[in-house]
Image (cartoon, rainbow, N blue to C red):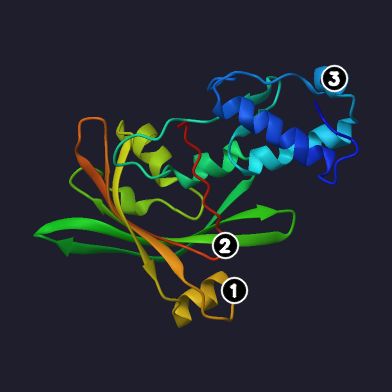
Amino acid sequence: MLNKHDSVPLYVQLQNIIRSEIVSGKYKEGESIPSETEMMKTYQVTRTTIRKAIANLVDEALLVKLHGKGTMVCLREMKHNIWNFSGFTDYTRKKNEVPVSRVLKKEIITLDQASYMHLVRLRGTRRETHTSWLTLDTSYVPLALFPGIEAYDFAEQSLYQLMNQRYGTYPQNATLGISPMNSTPLTKELFGYKEDVPLIRAKGSVLDESGTEVEKVEVVYGPNVEFKVVTHI
């Protein structure tokens, strides 16, 4: 139960309890947690306290709020060769945020005697009038698998959704190498920071369900991105 005499705020105590119940398996992937009304009765706290706790767990990517369905667990097991990597559009929408993309480059190039679309995008989220830029994504997409894909506007269109809906292919696994990198004048300009800070870069291949490479990818994560890994020991 919650301790109202503790120096730790009630919403943080509640947040810790719910997180522990998710990690321990009390609430499974896709299951709903108790409603706000139920938790008000159980923990004798206000609706505001409950909403603050839930909002923080949504930010941690442990919960997702779905209209008409309530608040559900979105914890997934980490699988081999996957490092919390998924489509940016799907990820942001699960957090009830608006994805924003700015196309910096789109061209046709030749790699290993094959044609690729070379796509560079700045990715972020928008809340009201403020945009927070989070990642710099560089993609190399084989035109042999996706002919004509370069004609689409990727400031508006999700690359992975287009692969699925237009070409019947859905990226399923990512094999990535993770490494640190130093700030550059370009990253400072794009992400909007001044001091030198270390950044994280993921580089590798995205594969479909048959194991075919559908994208060569490099993602630079900006200083506003926070990584959280939740695992059951």
Type of the residue with mark 1? Gly
The residue where tag 2 is placed is 133
Earlier in the chain: of badge 2 and badge 1, it is 2
For residue 179, what is the image quadrant?
Answer: bottom left
Kind of element beneath mark 2: strand
Single out the mark in the foreground, 2 or 3. 3
The Cα–Cα distance between marks 2 and 1, rounded to whole angstroms, is: 8 Å
- Residue 125 lies, in percent from the top left, at 61, 53
Earlier in the chain: of badge 1 and badge 3, it is 3
In this rendering, does residue 138 appear at all?
Answer: no
Quarter of the image for the C terminus: give it: top left
Residue at horizontal 39%, vertical 41%? 160
Where 148 sits versus 179, above or below? above
| Residue contact between numbered discs 1 and 3, judged by CB atoms under 8 Å | no
Residue at horizontal 56%, vertical 55%? 226
- Residue 84 lies, in percent from the top left, at 43, 43
- The disc at residue 37 is 3
The Cα–Cα distance between marks 2 and 3, rounded to whole angstroms, is: 36 Å
Compared across the picture, whether 123 is left or right of 119 comes to right
| Residue contact between numbered discs 2 and 1, judged by CB atoms under 8 Å | yes
Residue at horizontal 76%, vertical 41%? 12
